[in-house]
C-alpha cells in the first residue's frame, strides 16, 4: 500500500500514539491536531485501520476493495487514509483509537473483542456457528440479527456497519507432528491456543488449558511447544504459515468469527448525508461479497486443496464426539445469554438459527 503524504512528512506511529493518548495515560478529546483541517473549506479525512497484513490475501482482498470503493466514491466528498498491518495502531489499540477519535473506522475480528462488546459472542458460540456459516444471510446488513446487535452495541457508542455478510468457515483444532489431536479424548491435559472466550468456555469440560496467543505469535508457540495445538481458522493457518508446524486438523466446528467495519455511533449519526452514502455503498459491496467469496473461492477452492497436497491429515469428528460436544457446549450458550441479558441473548440465538 502506498505511503500517504502524511507518512512521507514524517508522521510516525509514535507521533500518532502520542496524539491519540494510547498507552500514555492521556485521552484525546477532539483528535490529534495533525488531522485537523488546515482551512474551513478543507474536506474531512476519515482514517481507517486494520492489524491484518497483506499475507492474509483472502482477508485483505475484500478490505482493499472496500477502500477502493470508498476512495473512488468519496472524490469531492471527503479524504480517506487507510493503514494495514498494525502500522498505525496494533490490534489491541484499535478500539481505543476509535474512541479517541483519532481513527474513524476500523476492520476488526469479532473474536478479539467479544469481552469488550459481548453481543459479538453470537458469532462464536459453539455448535451454533455451523448455522451461521451455512446461512450468512441471517447476518446481513439490516437483517433482524444485525439490528439487534447494533442496538446492543449502541450502548457502548459503537456502530457495526457490516459484518461482511456472514461468519467465515469455523475454527478447528490443529496440531503438530508430536501432539496428534484427533478426538475429544485427546484434548485432556493439552495446552491449546485459543482467542475467543466462547471457545475457551467450550473446551473447559475436556480438561484443556487454554492459552491466549495472538495470531502473530502462534507460529513460535507451536514451534517451541508452548502449546500443543491451536484453535484457528484456515485463514490464520495460511496467513501465518502455521502449516509449517502442523500436520493434523481435527475438524470440530468449535467457534467462528466475522470481520466487521466499526465506527463510533455518535459520529455515524452526525455524518453528513453524502459521506454516509459513500460508506453505505462500500459496505453493501462488502456485505454481499466478502464472506461468500472467502469461504468458497479462497478456502474451499484454494487453501484446503493446497494443505492436503502438502500432507495435512484432516480428521472428521465421530458422531459420538459431535453429540458429546453439542451437549457439553450448551452451558456456554446459557453463560453467554447471562452476559448479554437473557432476553436479548435468546432472541439473537433464535435469529441465528432462523427461528424468528
Image (cartoon, grey):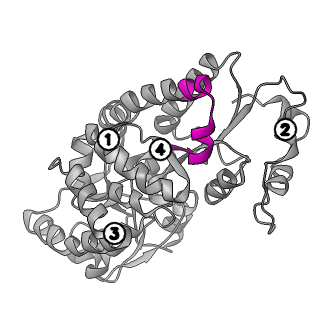
Q: What element does badge 2 sit on?
A: loop
User: Does any portion of residue 178 appear in the rendered image?
Assistant: no
Q: Is residue 312 magenta?
A: no
> In x, y percent, where is residue 140?
34, 37
* Residues drawn in magenta: 260-279
> In x, y percent, where is residue 304?
32, 41
Q: Disc number at residue 304?
A: 1
Return the disc, 4 or 1, that comes first in the chain's sequence: 4
As drawn, is 58 to the left or to the right of 95? left
Q: Disc number at residue 36?
A: 2
What is the distance, in whole Å, between disc 2 and disc 3 at their CAs?
A: 40 Å
Q: What element does badge 4 sit on?
A: strand
User: Does any portion of residue 355 appear in the rendered image?
Assistant: yes
- Front: mark 4 or 2: 2
Return the disc, 3 or 4, that comes first in the chain's sequence: 4
Q: In front: 292, or 313?
A: 292
As drawn, is 196 to the left or to the right of 83? left
Q: Name the residue under label 4.
A: 260
Q: Name the residue under label 3.
A: 341
Amino acid at each position: 500500500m502506498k505511503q500517504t503524504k502524511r507518512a512521507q512528512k514524517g508522521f510516525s506511529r509514535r507521533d500518532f500514539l502520542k496524539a491519540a493518548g494510547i498507552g500514555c495515560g492521556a485521552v484525546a478529546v477532539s483528535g490529534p491536531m495533525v488531522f485537523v483541517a488546515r482551512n474551513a473549506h478543507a474536506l474531512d479525512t476519515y482514517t481507517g485501520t486494520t492489524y491484518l497484513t497483506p499475507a492474509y490475501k483472502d482477508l485483505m482482498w475484500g478490505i482493499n476493495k472496500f477502500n477502493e470503493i470508498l476512495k473512488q466514491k468519496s472524490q469531492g466528498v471527503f479524504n480517506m487514509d487507510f493503514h494495514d498491518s498494525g502500522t498505525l495502531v496494533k490490534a489491541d489499540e484499535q478500539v481505543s483509537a476509535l474512541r479517541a477519535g483519532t481513527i474513524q473506522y476500523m476492520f476488526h475480528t469479532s473474536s478479539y473483542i467479544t469481552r469488550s462488546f459481548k453481543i459479538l459472542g453470537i458469532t462464536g458460540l459453539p455448535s451454533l456457528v455451523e448455522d451461521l456459516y451455512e446461512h450468512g444471510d441471517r447476518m446481513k446488513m439490516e437483517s433482524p440479527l444485525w439490528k439487534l446487535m447494533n442496538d446492543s452495541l449502541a450502548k457502548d457508542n459503537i456502530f457495526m456497519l457490516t459484518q461482511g455478510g456472514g461468519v467465515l468457515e469455523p475454527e478447528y483444532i490443529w496440531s503438530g507432528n508430536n501432539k496428534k489431536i484427533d478426538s475429544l479424548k485427546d484434548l485432556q491435559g493439552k495446552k491449546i491456543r485459543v482467542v475467543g472466550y466462547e471457545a475457551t468456555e467450550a473446551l473447559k469440560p475436556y480438561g484443556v488449558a487454554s492459552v491466549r496467543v495472538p495470531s502473530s505469535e502462534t507460529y513460535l508457540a507451536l514451534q517451541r511447544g508452548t502449546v500443543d495445538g491451536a484453535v484457528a481458522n484456515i485463514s490464520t493457518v495460511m496467513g501465518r504459515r502455521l502449516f509449517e508446524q502442523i500436520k493434523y486438523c481435527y475438524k470440530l466446528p468449535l467457534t467462528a468469527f466475522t470481520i466487521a467495519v466499526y465506527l463510533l455511533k455518535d459520529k455515524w449519526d452526525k455524518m453528513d448525508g453524502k459521506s454516509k452514502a459513500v460508506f453505505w455503498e462500500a459496505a453493501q459491496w462488502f456485505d454481499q461479497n466478502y464472506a461468500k467469496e472467502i469461504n468458497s473461492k479462497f478456502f474451499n477452492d484454494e487453501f484446503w486443496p493446497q494443505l492436503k497436497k502438502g500432507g495435512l491429515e484432516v480428521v472428521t469428528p465421530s458422531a459420538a464426539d459431535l453429540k458429546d460436544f453439542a451437549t457439553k457446549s450448551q452451558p456456554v450458550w446459557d453463560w453467554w445469554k447471562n452476559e448479554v441479558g437473557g432476553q436479548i441473548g435468546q432472541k439473537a440465538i433464535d435469529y441465528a438459527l432462523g427461528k424468528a
